[in-house]
């Protein structure tokens, strides 16, 4: 059987195609989604071997609210790859997950139901929230009803369940070829929690997970620690304040700071060891203004001589550099900002009566208020010199937060990621080099992130809806937690919630009692679970049958903005847990940009929701827009491209209707060739098949590299040439106007080309192509083999695509003659001379009859352009137009 045949094989007997009178895109998404579900055409077959599988680790979207056009963009590209691989014969493992837990979900639940979590409250059976559906008033924390942690989690599960149904509807409408019946997962269900907790405990056992009391980036709104990868810089207005510290001789040394409110937290001044201005100060002490605290002057290479006064105050803690200085210079801790973002009630290191009085006026104040009050005091005391110098500077924010991050000292859990272990860092850099990147330059983003890490991965969060950290601690005789006595469950007990479950050997009555146990009340960062997606969808906790057939995955598709989070964290987890990469390759997509060239995001309020677009332009039209974007490139949101995609899908329907519209068509076009290799007899028809063979080769090469955009750039132009030129050229001949043999050749060429092009377009336009396939073939186009070039070349014989190119170019200039004359294309040309390059004269003469029929040319001569002429483009000379045809009367 020819390689053009489908893998399943079909009866090659001729049958009448069931072509609709008016083909339409309307309703195809619902029709074919149901058909694909019933036929299980995208089901993964577990009875397989690793060599037969192509596995894709798809990103789970956060189930909080609605999908946006960026999701449609990225998942369309992943689906094109999945569909192509399936057609090449691979057993495709293409799951879909939902990232349920995390701060975005909690915030949505708070606003939607008008509640907030208070873990001190008891569980209320059958709790009914104040409302369902957010509003501006209850979005404010002071207006939200406090409820127990368990009640809050129940509402989180309820709302994410509804969101997931809506997400699945959008993705089904989009045509994602996911095995919806089997390959779906959540990051919060029992299996996910058990997987995440087992991985965490394995890290604890290996020493790669540890807890530490340390300065931690802290979001004061959510009151939780924040990892380095979750931070972003935002440009904010600020000011340099020139403030004087008093030297032992009474003279002043001036520092310039943007955070004068941290003066009570000052533990030292620091300058560069080579700075001549401060050599005599190193090793001495100075006294802070207002608060009268004596602090040392230190030298450190991180101090910048050309910044401000060249000498800075070290506070605990203003930023990450303060943390480094504090650690490396072994300085005391004098933190003044609490977890709520307000100044703590007392600062016991301020011992003078005047200093204590000053501090009392900022105790309990917000950072903003404290800064204002301290600046006023410094101005009054004369310690603030000159006017503050206004600046705009980058400030660290939690990526989902509303206020600048602060540093607070707290006990947190960390996972080693190379931030403090140079050997592990080198290993992870090597993993990045082993990974195949599409496009290749994205590897540098990964490398830059790993090489510039400043600490390990902080994975504990002081929130509620997430995977509980599965540990308890012993309780000392004085009732305080003994963090060195770590109590952990066995793997068989997982998942657990330590706030509800009891460690082995204890009873509930011993909870929080001396000699008993206490729960770790924190949850794991959502990335700590979603970084395990390759293990969540396999049997990592079981017999690992599926794991061995799909892992390491073949591909991770994702955005470039989460290389530092999702991609890197998954590499870390797989490296530590399985001593391997999680996937062989990663394809990176760009952002969607709004008309102002800004990234579309929910936080910016400039996102577009996809369902209206899918209805307006059809899923095939929207997918076309996504498919045109190159790997890694940011892409403008452009409805114009969706319109073009919709027109392309409609053209597929209409061109197919013509190609199949000759009464009977072989149900297997390749059967024509198998029964009679000479069925395609005409030179132009063979040239078209040769050109199509070139397209198949180029598209296959591009898609093998996951370059869906390049493949479409080859497939689409040929299709328009096929429709606008080839079909028009052979239309008359296919109807029998040049004899039966010529008609059979045209019809065979049309059906063979249609078969191949439907397969080429199938990953991009899944609905239109399967609709056409159903008119004349059994099964789904998506279950067919990807086309091969060899049988097309066999049918083409010695022909190349050159004849089609020359004839198409000739037709274009003939049409232009009539367009310039502003007459109908059916107007006859009584005579015309086509001037073509000498090498193309004989080519064009071989298909002059088709050119004459299409151009209505009665007397055509073909002449060679002088080889010495500068202009070698085809042109018409001596054209003489006849009378325009009479207009057809309207019915």
Image: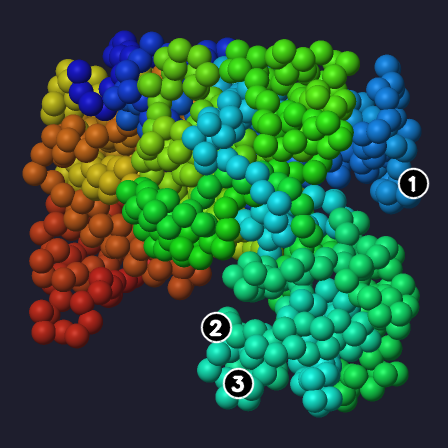
Q: Is residue 497 left or right of residue 597?
A: right
**What residue sits 73% from the left and 64% below the top?**
265
Disc on the earlier residue, 2 or 1: 1
**Which of the two discs, 3 and 1, sits closer to the camera?**
3
Q: How far separated are the C-alphas under marks 2 and 1?
A: 50 Å
**Which of the two discs, 2 and 1, sits closer to the camera?**
2
- The circle drawn on residue 143 is 1
- The circle drawn on residue 176 is none
Task: Please tell me whether mark 2 sits on a helix, a strand or a loop.
Answer: loop
**What residue sits 33% from the left and 19% below the top?**
548
Which percent across, then down, holds residue 596? 61, 62
Disc on the earlier residue, 3 or 1: 1
Q: Quadrant of residue 372?
A: bottom right
Disc on the earlier residue, 2 or 3: 3
**What residue sits 9% from the left and 61% below the top?**
838
Which percent across, then down, holds residue 243? 73, 81
The residue pinned by badge 2 equals 301
Disc 3 + disc 1, Cβ < 8 Å: no
Which percent across, then down, holds residue 439? 35, 49
Query: In the rendered view, would you say 639 is above or below 738?
Result: below
The residue pinned by badge 3 equals 279
Q: Nearer the viewer, residue 136 or 303?
A: 303
Q: Is residue 216 left or right of residue 770?
A: right
Query: In the rendered view, would you say 633 is above or below 310?
Result: above
Q: Is residue 77 left or right of residue 411?
A: left
Which percent across, then down, holds residue 65? 70, 36
Disc 2 + disc 3, Cβ < 8 Å: no
Alpha-carbon neighbours of circle 2 within 10 Å: few (<14), some, or many (≥20)? few
Q: Nearer the viewer, residue 492 or 544?
A: 492
């Amino acid at each position: 059987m020819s390689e053009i045949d489908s893998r399943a094989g079909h009866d090659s007997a001729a049958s009448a195609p069931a072509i609709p009178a008016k083909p339409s895109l309307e309703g195809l998404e619902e029709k074919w989604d149901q058909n694909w579900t019933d036929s299980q055409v995208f089901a993964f077959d577990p009875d397989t071997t690793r060599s037969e599988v192509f596995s894709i680790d798809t990103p789970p979207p956060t189930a909080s609210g609605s999908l946006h056009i960026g999701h449609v963009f990225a998942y369309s590209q992943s689906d094109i790859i999945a569909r192509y691989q399936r057609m090449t014969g691979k057993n495709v493992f293409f799951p879909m997950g939902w990232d349920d837990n995390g701060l975005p979900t909690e915030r949505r639940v708070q606003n939607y139901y008008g509640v907030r979590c208070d873990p001190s409250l008891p569980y209320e059976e059958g709790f009914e929230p104040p409302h369902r559906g957010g509003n501006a008033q209850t979005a404010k924390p002071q207006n939200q009803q406090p409820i127990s942690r368990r009640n809050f989690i129940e509402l989180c599960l309820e709302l994410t369940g509804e969101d997931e149904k809506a997400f699945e509807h959008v993705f089904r409408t989009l045509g994602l070829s996911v095995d919806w019946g089997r390959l779906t997962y959540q990051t919060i269900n029992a299996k996910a929690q058990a997987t995440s907790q087992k991985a965490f405990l394995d890290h604890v056992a290996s020493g790669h997970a540890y807890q530490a009391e340390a300065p931690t980036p802290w979001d004061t709104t959510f009151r939780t620690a924040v990892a380095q990868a979750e931070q972003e810089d935002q440009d904010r207005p600020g000011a340099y304040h020139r403030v004087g510290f008093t030297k032992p001789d009474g003279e002043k040394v001036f520092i310039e700071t943007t955070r004068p409110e941290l003066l009570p937290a000052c533990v030292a001044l620091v300058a560069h060891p080579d700075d001549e201005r401060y050599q005599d100060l190193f090793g001495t002490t100075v006294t802070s203004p207002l608060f009268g605290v004596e602090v040392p002057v230190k030298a450190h290479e991180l101090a910048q001589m050309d910044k401000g006064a060249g000498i800075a105050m070290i506070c605990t803690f203003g930023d990450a550099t303060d943390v480094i200085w504090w650690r490396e210079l072994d300085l005391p801790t004098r933190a003044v900002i609490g977890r709520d973002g307000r100044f703590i009630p007392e600062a016991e290191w301020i011992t003078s009566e005047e200093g204590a009085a000053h501090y009392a006026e900022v105790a309990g104040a917000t950072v903003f208020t404290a800064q204002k009050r301290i600046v006023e005091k410094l101005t009054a005391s004369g310690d603030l010199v000159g006017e503050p110098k206004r600046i705009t500077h980058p400030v660290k924010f939690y990526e989902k937060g509303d206020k600048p991050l602060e540093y607070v000292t707290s006990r947190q859990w960390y996972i080693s990621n190379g931030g403090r272990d140079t050997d592990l860092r080198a290993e992870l850099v090597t993993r990045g080099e082993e990974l195949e990147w599409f496009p290749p330059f994205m590897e540098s983003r990964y490398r830059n992130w790993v090489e510039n890490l400043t600490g390990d991965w902080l994975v504990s969060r002081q929130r509620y809806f997430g995977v509980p950290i599965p540990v308890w601690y012993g309780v000392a005789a004085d009732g305080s937690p003994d963090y060195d006595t770590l109590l952990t469950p066995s793997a068989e007990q997982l998942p657990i919630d330590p706030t509800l479950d009891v460690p082995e050997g204890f009873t509930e009555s011993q909870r929080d009692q001396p000699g008993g146990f206490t729960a770790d009340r924190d949850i794991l960062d959502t990335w700590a679970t979603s970084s395990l997606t390759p293990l969540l969808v396999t049997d990592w906790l079981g017999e690992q049958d599926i794991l061995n057939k799909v892992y390491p995955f073949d591909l991770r598709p994702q955005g470039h903005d989460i290389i530092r989070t999702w991609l890197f964290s998954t590499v870390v987890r797989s490296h530590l847990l399985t001593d391997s990469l999680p996937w062989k390759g990663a394809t990176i997509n760009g952002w969607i940009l709004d008309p102002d060239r800004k990234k579309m995001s929910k936080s910016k309020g400039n996102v577009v929701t996809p369902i209206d677009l899918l209805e307006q332009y059809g899923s095939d039209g929207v997918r076309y827009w996504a498919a045109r974007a190159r790997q890694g490139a940011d892409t403008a949101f452009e409805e114009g491209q969706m319109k073009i995609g919709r027109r392309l899908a409609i053209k597929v329907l209409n061109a197919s209707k013509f190609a199949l519209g000759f009464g009977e068509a072989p149900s297997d076009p390749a059967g024509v060739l198998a029964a009679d290799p000479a069925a395609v007899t005409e030179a132009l028809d063979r040239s078209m098949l040769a050109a199509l063979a070139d397209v198949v080769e180029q598209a296959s090469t591009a898609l093998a590299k996951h370059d869906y955009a390049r493949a479409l750039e080859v497939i689409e132009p040929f299709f328009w040439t096929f429709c606008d030129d080839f079909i028009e050229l052979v239309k008359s001949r296919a109807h029998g106007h040049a004899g039966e043999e010529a008609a059979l050749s045209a019809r065979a060429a049309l059906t063979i080309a249609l078969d191949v092009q439907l397969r080429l377009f199938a990953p991009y336009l899944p609905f239109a192509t399967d609709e056409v396939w159903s008119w004349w073939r059994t099964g789904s186009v998506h279950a067919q083999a990807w086309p091969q070039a060899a049988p097309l070349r066999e049918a083409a014989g010695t022909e190349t695509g050159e004849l089609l190119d020359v004839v198409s170019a000739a037709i274009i200039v003939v049409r232009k003659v009539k367009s310039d004359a502003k007459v109908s294309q059916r107007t006859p040309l009584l005579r015309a001379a086509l001037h073509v390059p000498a090498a193309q004269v004989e080519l064009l003469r071989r298909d002059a009859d088709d050119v004459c029929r299409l151009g209505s040319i009665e007397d055509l001569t073909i002449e060679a352009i002088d080889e010495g002429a500068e202009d070698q483009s085809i042109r018409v000379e001596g054209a003489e137009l006849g009378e325009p045809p009479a207009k057809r009367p309207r019915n």
